[in-house]
């Protein structure tokens, strides 16, 4: 495949043939031992002189004291030992590095060479004892210490990873991950190799249709026989969308049972997951497996119908997050726990690094600390000037060299490496000492108030702001009532506002972190501070590298609360014949491959939970989208961009912590993870806040593309393997928005961040008859969620949808027949629509593998129309927000739930008999296609930018 080699190279290739495990272990151990041997030889044989003070003394120091010359000669032995150890360690790092990691490994290797050369040169200059060269010796010493930091970090990490992978390596089991497809990113400048002769759009479209087990020939055959491939999609919108979908599927049950696919997004997944769990044939609870006193009922025609025990169970628990004051307190406690643990993992490194920095500057005074403005040594200033000039000259030479010349490429790479080294030198000599000096000055005037109050204030402010961002049900109240504020903010692009808020939030946290770091550094390596840093470091390792990062978020709480409400079985008790809904026990794991399918000959569509996998920084997604499709079903997990893996095989290769999310209940929660640190097209300023606070949803799941590349390199002991848990680095990736395409895990959240209707997934599976239950709360123009889905389908799949109206004006609020002024419900006139149903024709491009196949689409939007029952219109009159209650309101009472399910039932009735043109006859598909294309072209927007401006996020 076109992208397979790329991902494989990023994970395993490009390093040369790795050595055997025994050689790898030997090299790692020797790399660890050599610096220790050199330090021991120096300590035993060299006279006791303050060699560091001599190195940094510069031209103002007195002549070398007695024994200094001998110490310098023994220092050459130490240099040889630690230099060899660094070279071996950085070489080991290159064996186990990815493509990005290899750049860091090469930089570490170069830094090791620079450190050794600088150390040798410094010793020679000190032995020569020429006065004006002593400042040059100081510059060499500063360069040595600056280069040793990245070199030692790379070498130690390389040695650690090599030892870990060599010791824990086990050959792969036969047949593991045999069903895995690599991805073909849709947003690369170069098309996939399999279609490299096609135009760019055709290549992207063809890759977008890559779905396992979907045969276009079968769709073509069925269409020719007059048999549609039917698909249902349920939109996002939290409990609001779940209630509407439940009602709609009650009246559309016969059509649903004849469908091939049921795609759910976010809140729609609550209902789809509920149906799936009530009908699954998998039973692991011994109460039902024995079935002595109960009979499990699995009836697709009656499950969750109006008035059933299952619907009543959900109705009584529709405030699923917290139904009692005690549960509210519990929810707030969960947020507080996640906040404290997340902030601890974020701020604990500040304490450890700060104490180590204070110890370092006490032992190696590169720049004396304590002054508000750092006063670096003269040699350090010489070094900075020399590095800047050299970097500039190399950059000029590299960019001025002829294209393709190797010397130009080497010059540019050297300039990049010198840039990073210059930054390290500047940080060590200027930035960090100045920061410590400023904080020390402040602390001397305020005591510990700032050092303690800053982090404590950050915790409190972050907690309050998180609750406001997540739990405030009526966020539009102030926005709608303050016209002056709206006028000001309306003139500023929303993207700019988001960035301003992100900068402010991040700046606050960054200032608190720096305050804690610098305050810890003022301890100057005191014994008590070192013991404190050790304790904090151990606690950080336990929390950050033992506990699962996802377990510290709201995701487990959210998953459990959804399961408590929507995961039930219907049983008939033998003792009294009553039919009751029995919740799933918390100990029963609803594995996706087993519980995600309906067996025993029952008729029900394949349930597909639509989520979004986030990719950033590599132009893998359209601008502003930042995510790609990631679906979860009983058969496959993944998407066309990132690849696919068989669900059962994925469950077999991951640890228990991941299996908790590879369940029906986990898929429901992931697909509905609206409040997350990454939100795709719905990006908001508080994303960083959610990541830091722990009040975030979503989780990290295996990257199918990585699994495919790992399978190819399965015999290599140096290959990367799936992590056993989502540890501290993944929290940092969420905070800083780092989501590379070739990562082992992908950050997966709400499917609405990609497509809030789920339509694109049905188009991807080439459905020829589609029912879409749209409960999104988009504001006029009414069909913004639909417009975004159709634009995305056109871009990624080449699908055109020709609506039966120029614009769905009949579904616009105010288009319905107005009620007489004397009618008590006349206040609803501005909210009534003529018809909540939008219909159209679906046109598939040749890249779909279909020839002349057209489809029909029926979109049922959650709107009000005059023919609704009086009870429903009366409820709407008393509740102006109905049927658009905010997704921030997940505390539905009985009244809201009943109103939304009743609206869904009425929508389903209208969807059964839409006022639309008949579908094209199979005998003349070409004529229908040509007419539809002509109609679409006649009313197409003048440009894509105009189309984008015509809609907004749902």
Image (spheres, rainbow, N blue to C red):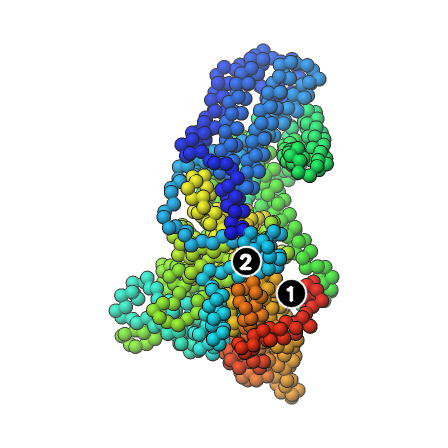
Image point (42%, 34%), residue name: 20
406 above or below 259?
Answer: above
Which of the pair 853/141 is nearer the observer?
Answer: 853
The residue tagged with tag 2: helix, strand or loop? helix
The residue tagged with tag 1: helix, strand or loop? loop
724 above or below 243?
Answer: above
854 above or below 69?
Answer: below
Quarter occupied by residue 928: bottom right
User: What separation in Å lies between label 2 and label 1 (alpha carbons)?
Assistant: 27 Å
**Badge number at residue 207:** 2
Q: How crowded is mark 1: few (under 14 residues within 10 Å), some or many (20 or more)?
A: some
Q: Where is residue 753 in the image (x, y as percent from the top left)?
A: 57, 60
Which of the pair 569/314 is nearer the observer?
Answer: 569
Which of the pair 181/950 is nearer the observer?
Answer: 181
Quarter occupied by residue 601: bottom left
Q: In which quarter of the image is the C terminus?
A: bottom right
Q: Report whether residue 634 is seen.
A: yes
Q: Residues within 10 Å of mark 2 (few under 14, many from 20)?
A: many
Q: Where is residue 248 in the image (x, y as percent from the top left)?
A: 49, 76
Q: Could you tell which of marks 2 and 1 lies nearer the N-terminus?
A: 2
Image point (70%, 59%), residue name: 493
Image point (56%, 74%), residue name: 925
Q: Report whether residue 559 is seen.
A: no
405 above or below 763?
Answer: above
Which of the pair 568/276 is nearer the observer?
Answer: 276
Q: Position of residue 440 (x, y in %)?
A: 64, 35
**Badge number at residue 952:** 1
């Amino acid at each position: 495949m076109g992208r397979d080699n790329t991902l494989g190279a990023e994970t395993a290739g490009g390093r040369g043939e790795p050595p055997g495990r025994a050689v790898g272990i030997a090299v790692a151990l020797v790399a660890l031992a050599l610096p220790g041997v050199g330090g021991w030889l120096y300590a035993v044989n060299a006279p006791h002189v303050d060699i560091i003070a001599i190195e940094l003394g510069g031209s103002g120091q007195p002549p070398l004291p007695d024994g200094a010359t001998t110490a310098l000669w023994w220092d050459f032995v130490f240099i040889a030992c630690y230099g060899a150890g660094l070279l071996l360690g950085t070489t080991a790092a290159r064996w186990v590095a990815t493509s990005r990691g290899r750049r860091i490994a090469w930089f570490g290797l170069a830094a090791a060479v620079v450190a050794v050369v600088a150390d040798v040169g410094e010793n020679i200059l000190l032995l020569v004892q020429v006065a004006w060269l002593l400042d040059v010796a100081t510059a060499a010493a500063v360069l040595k210490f600056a280069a040793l930091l990245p070199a030692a970090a790379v070498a130690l990490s390389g040695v650690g990873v090599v030892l870990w992978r060599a010791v824990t390596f086990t050959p792969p089991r036969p047949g593991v991950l045999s069903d895995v497809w690599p991805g073909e990113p849709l947003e690369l400048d170069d098309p996939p190799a399999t279609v490299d002769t096609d135009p760019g759009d055709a290549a992207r479209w063809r890759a977008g249709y890559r779905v396992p087990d979907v045969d276009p020939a079968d769709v073509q055959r069925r269409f020719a026989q007059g048999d549609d491939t039917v698909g249902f999609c349920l939109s996002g919108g939290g409990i609001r969308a779940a209630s509407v979908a439940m009602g709609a599927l009650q009246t559309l049950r016969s059509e649903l049972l004849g469908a091939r696919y049921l795609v759910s997004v976010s809140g729609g997944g609550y209902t789809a997951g509920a149906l799936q769990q009530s009908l699954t044939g998998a039973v692991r609870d011994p109460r039902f497996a024995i079935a002595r006193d109960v009979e499990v009922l699995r009836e697709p025609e009656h499950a969750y119908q109006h008035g059933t025990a299952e619907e009543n169970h959900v109705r009584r628990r529709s405030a699923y997050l917290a139904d009692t004051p005690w549960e509210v307190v519990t929810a707030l406690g969960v947020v507080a726990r996640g906040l404290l643990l997340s902030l601890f993992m974020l701020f604990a490194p500040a304490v450890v690094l700060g104490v180590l920095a204070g110890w370092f500057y006490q032992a190696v005074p590169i720049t004396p600390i304590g002054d508000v403005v750092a006063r670096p040594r003269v040699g350090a200033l010489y070094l900075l000037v020399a590095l800047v000039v050299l970097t500039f000259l190399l950059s000029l030479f590299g960019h001025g060299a002829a294209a393709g010349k190797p010397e130009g490429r080497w010059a540019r790479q050297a300039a990049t490496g010198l840039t990073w080294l210059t930054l390290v030198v500047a940080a060590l000599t200027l930035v960090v000492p100045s920061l410590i000096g400023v904080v020390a000055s402040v602390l001397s005037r305020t005591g510990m108030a700032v050092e303690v109050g800053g982090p404590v204030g950050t915790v409190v402010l972050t907690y309050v702001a998180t609750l406001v961002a997540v739990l405030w049900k009526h966020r539009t109240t102030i926005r709608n009532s303050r016209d002056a504020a709206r006028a000001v903010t309306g003139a500023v692009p929303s993207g700019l506002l988001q960035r301003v808020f992100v900068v402010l939030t991040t700046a606050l946290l960054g200032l608190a972190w720096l305050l804690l770091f610098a305050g810890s550094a003022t301890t100057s390596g005191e014994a008590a501070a070192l013991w404190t840093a050790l304790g904090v470091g151990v606690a950080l390792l336990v929390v950050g590298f033992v506990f699962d990062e996802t377990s510290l978020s709201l995701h487990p709480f959210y998953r459990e609360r959804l399961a408590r409400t929507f995961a039930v079985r219907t049983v008939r008790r033998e003792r009294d014949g009553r039919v009751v809904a029995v919740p799933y026990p918390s100990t029963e794991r609803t594995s996706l491959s087993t519980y995600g399918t309906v067996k025993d000959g029952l008729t029900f569509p394949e349930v597909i939970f639509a989520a979004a996998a986030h990719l950033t920084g590599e132009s893998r997604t359209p601008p502003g989208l930042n995510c790609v499709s990631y679906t979860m079903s009983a058969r496959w997990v993944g998407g066309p961009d990132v690849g696919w893996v068989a669900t059962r095989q994925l469950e077999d290769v991951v640890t228990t912590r991941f299996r908790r999310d590879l369940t029906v209940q986990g898929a429901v929660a992931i697909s509905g993870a609206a409040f997350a640190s990454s939100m795709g097209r719905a990006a908001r300023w508080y994303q960083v806040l959610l990541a830091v606070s722990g009040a975030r949803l979503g989780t990290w799941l295996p990257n199918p593309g990585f699994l495919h590349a790992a399978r190819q390199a399965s015999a290599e002991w140096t290959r990367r393997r799936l992590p056993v848990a989502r540890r501290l680095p993944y929290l940092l990736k969420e905070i800083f928005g780092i989501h590379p395409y070739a990562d082992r895990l992908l950050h997966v959240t709400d499917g609405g961040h990609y497509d809030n209707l789920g339509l694109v997934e049905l188009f991807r599976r080439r459905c020829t008859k589609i029912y879409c239950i749209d409960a999104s709360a988009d504001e006029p123009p009414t069909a913004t969620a639909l417009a975004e889905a159709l634009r995305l389908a056109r871009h990624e799949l080449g699908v055109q949808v020709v609506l039966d109206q120029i614009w769905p004006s009949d579904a616009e609020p105010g288009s319905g027949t107005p009620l007489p002024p004397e009618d008590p419900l006349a206040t609803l006139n501005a909210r009534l629509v003529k018809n909540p149903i939008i219909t159209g024709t679906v046109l598939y491009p040749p890249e779909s593998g279909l020839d002349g196949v057209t489809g029909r689409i029926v979109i049922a939007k959650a709107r009000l129309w005059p023919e609704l029952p009086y009870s429903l219109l009366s409820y709407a009159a008393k509740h102006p927000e109905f049927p658009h209650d905010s997704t921030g309101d997940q505390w539905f009472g009985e009244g809201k739930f009943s109103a939304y399910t009743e609206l869904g039932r009425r929508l389903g009735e209208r969807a059964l008999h839409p006022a639309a043109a008949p579908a094209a006859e199979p005998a003349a598909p070409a004529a229908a296609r040509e007419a539809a294309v002509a109609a679409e072209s006649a009313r197409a927007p003048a440009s894509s930018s105009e189309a984008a401006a015509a809609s907004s996020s749902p």
